[in-house]
Image: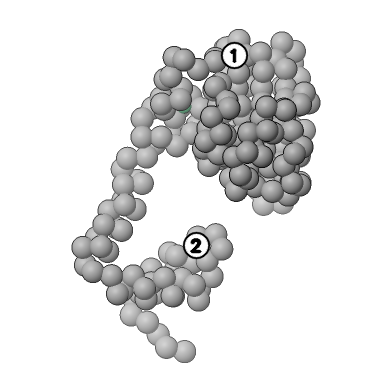
Amino acid sequence: MIKFPRPIRNLIDQFSKLPGIGPKTAERLVFNLLKWKHTDKADFANALNELNDSITQCSTCQNISEKDPCFICSDKNRDKTKLCVVAESHDLAAIENTGDYNGHYHVLGGVLDPLHGITPDVLNTNELVAKLQKNIITEILLAFNPDMEGEATMIYLKNLLEPFKKSKVTRLARGMPVGSDLEYTDEVTLSSAIQNRKEL
Ligand SMILES: [Zn+2]
């Protein structure tokens, strides 16, 4: 087997860490990058560095942001009595893109998956409970993918939120195909799932 120079092997290893990228694809990406102009490669490297330097986490909703608090948490026109709990920041973006939701968010940081070490203590569940203790929230919308982990997470959260009787707990309507990803659901379907949300 051909042994590539060390910088190439290093970059192949880094690309291989990305989801859905195997060593062969990583190799193809690196050899494509090698053909780029020096300045384009520098821009690529800078964009990556900016993730470290300019992206932070909003301490209120746990969303990725350039500022803390993020633009959603600092928006006075949003309904403070509504809280939408999502697994990841890209799910928040999908809900935002529908333009149908005007409340606040809480990013849980994943879904329950005990086989892979994702237990409640590694998710932002304590922050969620603290938020409910501190604020008057009348509706909590659990917006998770309708798959096994998403359903298990919603059941766990419903039980966790049981003491907050004043908050109605809702979930997205079941118009979304089972096993689908919020992130890839078209805006019309997701929009109707928000409007027809059901009490849990
Ligand atoms: Zn925020």
Tag shown at residue 126: none
Please state which of residues 172 and 56 is positioned toward the viewer in this rendering.
172
Question: Callout 1: few (<14), some (14-19), or many (20+) C-alpha neighbours within 10 Å?
Answer: some
The answer to whether residue 60 is visible is yes
**Amino acid carrying mark 1 in the image:** Thr
- Residue 164: x and y in percent read 71, 15
Task: Give the quadrant of the C terminus.
Answer: top right
User: Residue drawn at (35%, 46%), measured in percent from left and top?
Assistant: 52
The answer to whether residue 10 is visible is no
Please state which of residues 37 and 133 is positioned toward the viewer in this rendering.
37
Question: Callout 2: few (<14), some (14-19), or many (20+) C-alpha neighbours within 10 Å?
Answer: few
Please state which of residues 197 and 11 is positioned toward the viewer in this rendering.
197
* Discs 1/2, front: 1
Position above or below: 26 against 72: below
- Residue 199: x and y in percent read 77, 23
Position above or below: 42 against 199: below
What is the number of callouts on the image?
2
Q: Could you tell which of marks 1 and 2 lies nearer the N-terminus?
A: 2
Q: Are marks 1 and 2 in contact (CB under 8 Å)?
A: no
Determine the CA span between mark 1 and mark 2. 40 Å
Judged from the image, the secondary structure of the residue bearing numbered disc 2 is loop
The answer to which image quadrant residue 53 occupies is top left
Label 2 CB less than 8 angstroms from ligand 1? no
170 left or right, relative to 186: right
User: Residue drawn at (60%, 18%), measured in percent from left and top?
Assistant: 82
Residue that label 2 marks: 17
User: Residue drawn at (49%, 72%), measured in percent from left and top?
Assistant: 25
Residue that label 1 marks: 81
